[in-house]
Image (cartoon, rainbow, N blue to C red):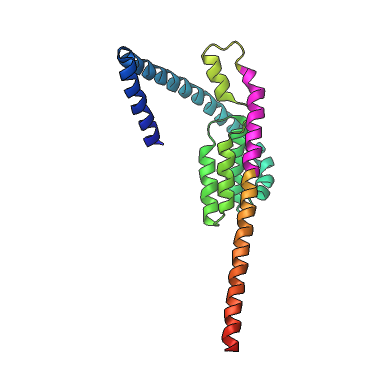
Amino acid sequence: MNAVFTAIFICSAAILAIVAPQDFLSSLIGGARTAAEVSLTLFCIYAVWMGLAAVAEDCGITKKTAALLKPLCRKAFKTKSESACEAAAMNLTCDLLGAGASTPFAVKAIGEWEKENNGYAQKLLFIINAAGFQLIPSTVIALRASYGSVAAADIFLPSLICSAATLIISVGLFIVTEKLTARKKGRKGAGRRTVKARKTAQKRTA
């Protein structure tokens, strides 16, 4: 991705330098200023929400929600590891609540599943996190509010619908792909066993 963004920047800068050389320096400075402002805004947003997440965790809200999700995680991820289920449940809980502290739990869960060689659960958790489903899109709402939006929370319903659709489609495609892959492997394994049986029969008859 670094190479892609570097190539895009170089091409854009070269085109701007040719088409409008007088705007080249001002565009670079303006882009840097905007990037710094957005970074600072996001830093403040994450600081607030991570603080709220810490309060929720100390109050036991996060752990109680994770306890409700734990049986579902055990079935969905096809695992017997209790620590992995707990970490995955905490990860999903933080994502659902819009808290910005979900990544360490995902890393812990994936590490536990690596020990039991559970690639299915690792890929499924990655897809769920990439889909970005949230009940409360706190970061987007805070960004809209910081830029002076009159109704910053109007994004709630569209975001909920889009993220839910993304989650359903991505998980559905993953499950279908896994089933098709398992069938292909089963057919290949059956074909190999058939070939071995034929060779063994030929040796016996010879």
In this rendering, does residue 194 appear at all? Answer: yes
In the image, farthest residue toward the bottom: 206
Residue 178 vs residue 130, the one in the foreground: 178
Is 141 inside the magenta-drawn segment? no
- Which residue is drawn at the image coordinates 61% and 46% (left, top)? 174
Residue 139 vs residue 104, the one in the foreground: 139
Tell me if residue 191 comes above or below residue 39 in the rendering: below
In this rendering, does residue 60 appear at all? Answer: no
Q: Position of residue 143 (x, y in %)?
A: 53, 19
Residue 13 vs residue 38, the one in the foreground: 13
In this rendering, position of residue 144 left or right of residue 71? left
Tell me if residue 118 comes above or below residue 195 in the rendering: above
Res 189 quadrant in image: bottom right
Quarter of the picture containing the N terminus is: top left
Tell me if residue 193 comes above or below residue 46 in the rendering: below
Q: Position of residue 23 (x, y in %)?
A: 33, 13
Is 154 inside the magenta-drawn segment? yes
Q: Which residues are magenta?
A: 153-172
Tell me if residue 94 comes above or below residue 205 in the rendering: above
